[in-house]
Image (spheres, helix red, strand yellow):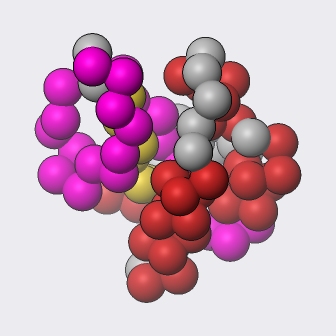
Amino acid sequence: MCIVCRGRSDKKELVRVVKNKDGEVFLDKTKKANGRGAYVCKSKECFEKLRKTRALNRAFKCDIPLEIYEKLGEEIENC
């Protein structure tokens, strides 16, 4: 389920962001990394709303660096 639009999709159609037990936040291209995961649709609309509302900060209950949002934006553009 996308954390922005709450739409349900197949995992292949979503991008996964993970926060591991060491507090590192990164894009999980394998979709199998250990840690707390959050999924986002591969649509520009969801990404813009994600960045505007800082939804990853709420999902992981911590401040997420802007570079994570930038990497996520690049990943969505490449899809």
Residue 66: percent from the left, percent from the top? Answer: 62, 53
Residue lying furthest bottom in this view?
78
Q: Nearer the viewer, residue 68 or 29?
A: 68
Magenta span includes 39? yes
Residue range of the region highlighted in magenta in the rendering: 22-45
Residue 62: percent from the left, percent from the top? Answer: 60, 21
Q: In this rendering, does residue 57 appear at all?
A: yes
Labels in figure, total: 0
Residue 27: percent from the left, percent from the top? Answer: 35, 51
Q: Nearer the viewer, residue 74 or 66?
A: 66
Point 63% across, 29% down: residue: 63
Q: Nearer the viewer, residue 70 or 11?
A: 70
Q: In this rendering, does residue 42 appear at all?
A: no
Magenta span includes 63? no
77 displayed left or right of 47: left
Q: Quadrant of residue 47?
A: bottom right
Point 28% across, 48% down: residue: 28
39 displayed left or right of 63: left
Q: Nearer the viewer, residue 23 or 53?
A: 23
Point 74% across, 53% down: residue: 51
Residue 2: percent from the left, percent from the top? Answer: 58, 42
Q: Is residue 35 above or below residue 24?
A: above
Q: Is residue 7 above or below residue 24?
A: below
Point 43% across, 80% down: residue: 79
Q: Is residue 21 above or below residue 63?
A: above
Q: Is residue 38 above or below residue 62?
A: below
